[in-house]
Amino acid sequence: MRRIICGVALALAACASDDDTPPAARATDSVAVDTSMAMVTRAATVTLGVEAMPAKADSILAAASLTIEEYEALMYRIAADSALSALYGDAIGGKR
Amino acid sequence: MRAPVLIPLLVLGPALLEAQAESSAALASRITAAAALPALAEEIRGSGVSRSELTSLLDVFRTKNIPAPDAKVILEEERSAARDHGPVPGLGSFVQARLDEGLRGRELAAAIRAEHAARGIGGDGMSGNARGKSAERGNASGRGNRDDQAPARRDDERTTPESRADDRKTSDTASRKPSEPGNRKADDAGNRKVEAPR
């Protein structure tokens, strides 16, 4: 019985500590995550599209509203971050 | 009136399509090279290059608009050089300097390899700076030890058959316990014989 009470207390403490996070910080975190996911999704979309249809590379880039230089810059940013690299790797299904 | 417009189009059409296909192929190859960079970067991080070094290198590529195929060649070279010679500190600034000098692609990759060979770790667990410091220390202490060993080797070379026999006696007596009375005599005799040539 004591163990259950301790467990519940710890869970509540954890929830309370989560709630202590300022709303502004939480919003910043979620924006950062959204931005990262958007970057990775955009890059992976182009990669997979060009892999499937290399002859349509220019159209695929245009559809993603990217120039080749912007796409390369995006890939440099992803490569510089190991978490983003892992997300990108998952997004393209482990293809290199 | 339509004929003068259509005829050049029919003649130039295939050539234009071919040019477009070539540009698409070039674009696709740039995209394919760029697509491989995150996995390559992971491998480089795995080979011991610090995250900050790699980030600075990739920032250089990004700010200088280096085409992805060139960057891929450089990163592949960095990966193999880091595996062979260990990571080199200040890689980002080194590459930036070489890019400013106008080096690109294979030339830059060769410069990176040379830099690794000159300053990288040669299996001794030291960076170029650490090796330099160690060499300085070697002048003070390491080389001194070697000099200490050198005369000993010269003495060995100079030994005559007689002195070698004396050495054998000395080593035989040394292997015995000195507390035994017989051995003490032998020790004394051996020492005298060893000292005699001096």
Image (cartoon, rainbow, N blue to C red):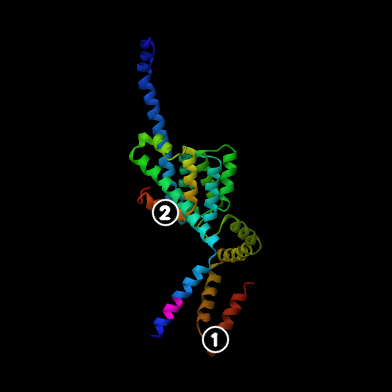
B198 w.r.t. B120: above or below: below
Nearest to viewer (mark 2 / mark 1)? 2
Q: Which residue is mark 2?
A: A87
Q: Are marks 2 and 1 in contact (CB under 8 Å)?
A: no
The structure residue drawn at horizontal position 42% and vertical position 42%, both measured from the top left corner, is B33
Left or right of B147? Residue B12 is left
Q: Chain of mark 2?
A: A
Is disc 1 placed on a helix, strand or loop?
Answer: loop
Place residue B186 in its image quadrant.
bottom right
The structure residue drawn at horizontal position 36% and vertical position 41%, both measured from the top left corner, is A49
Front position in the image: B100 or A74: A74
Front position in the image: B1 or B40: B1
User: Distance from label 2 to label 1 (Cα)?
Assistant: 74 Å
Does the magenta portion include B110?
Answer: no
Left or right of A94? Residue B153 is right
Image mark count? 2
Q: Position of residue B78 (x, y in %)?
A: 49, 48
Q: Position of residue A6 (x, y in %)?
A: 43, 81
Left or right of B147? Residue A44 is left
Q: Which residue is mark 1?
A: B178
The structure residue drawn at horizontal position 54% and vertical position 86%, both measured from the top left corner, is B178
Is disc 2 placed on a helix, strand or loop?
Answer: helix
Magenta stretch, main secondary structure, is helix
Q: Which residues are magenta?
A: A6-10
Q: Residues within 10 Å of mark 1 (few under 14, many from 20)?
A: some
Q: Amino acid at mark 2?
A: Leu
**Location of the N terminus of chain A (image quadrant):** bottom left
Q: Amino acid at mark 1?
A: Pro
Q: Position of residue B167 (x, y in %)?
A: 54, 74
Place residue B187 in its image quadrant.
bottom right
